Amino acid sequence: MKLFARELGQGSPIVILHGLYGSSDSWFTVGRMLAKKYRVILVDLRNHGKSSFSPLHTYEVMSNDLLELFNRFNLSEARLVGHSMGGKVAMHFTYQNPTRVASLVVVDILPYNYFNQEQGVGEVKQHAKIISSLLVLNPEQAESRDELDKKLAKTLPNKALRRFLLKNVKRNDVGRFEWQLNVPVIGKSIEQLMGAVLPVGGAVPITVNTLFIKGQNSSYVFNEGISQLKQLFMNFEVKTIPNAGHWLHTENPEAMIKEMLQFWNFQS
């Protein structure tokens, strides 16, 4: 699939992949800050944003989509950043195409199957609740965003989460609201999306220098999982961003960018 992407700045390329329910818009502020020094490519993954909808939503096909983008943008090599679902795409892509990735930054996610992790129970339940709430929401029948927000509030009390989710609702050419998120396919794919992306046991570890960044208040990156990373990555480090949860790129972007720049400066 040919993915939608937007470019900012000039210099050495960085490709940024958003998380589930996100889009390139989610990382625009971070991208604009990084564009002072780098060429930043913000991507809409399939079934999100301005990229096409598809009945397939696996890490294999999303990795293939990313390879098409690398070739289309003439990227022989690039720094790769991925958040949550995008982080899993980035790890899968790096495992399959190590020579195309100069360095890897994985934001608040681990490569494991969260259904099989005791620490992942909360995340699995949260996604199930989000999907069920979005499936019964009919944007095309709404007259205003406030109307949609009030409907979502019945099952999702977190206002910041609702605001983030409703960024996927846009007006079409006739002025009606519509999804820029393929909710039914995402719902059917959630078990696969929460699954593992790297083979465990007997696999050749990723040699690309990797930085894992976790939010201090997030439970997606847990100590037991960190201790197992050495089986999958030859060279990695883990940094924690204070005063931030899973969406740390909006909660504390300055601290996150500082860690990334220090990582890249050390690698260069």
Image: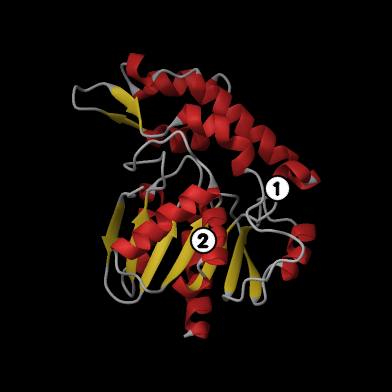
Image coordinates of residue 90 in percent, x first then y, are 52, 59
Residue 73, percent from left and from top: 29, 64
Label ID, residue 39: none
Secondary structure under tag 2 reads helix
Would residue 254 appear left or right of 131 to someone viewing this image?
left
Picture residue at 51% right of the left edge, 43% below the top: 20
Circle 2 or circle 1, nearest the eye:
2
x and y percent of residue 253 in the render? 47, 60
With respect to residue 244, does 205 lie above or below? below
**Image label count:** 2
Residue at image location 65% in from the left, 58% down from the top: 198
Q: Which mark is residue 93?
A: 2
Residue 262 is situated, as x and y percent measured from the top left of the image, at 51, 78
Name the residue that disc number 1 marks: 113
Residue 222 versus residue 194 in the image, above or below: below
Instruction: Check disc 2 and give the amino acid type.
Output: Phe
* Nearer to us in this view, 255 or 262: 262
> Which residue in the rendered view is the most extreme toward the top?
141
- Residue at figure coordinates x 26%, y 28% from the top left: 171
Please report the residue visible at 49 percent of the width from the left and 31 percent of the height from the top: 185
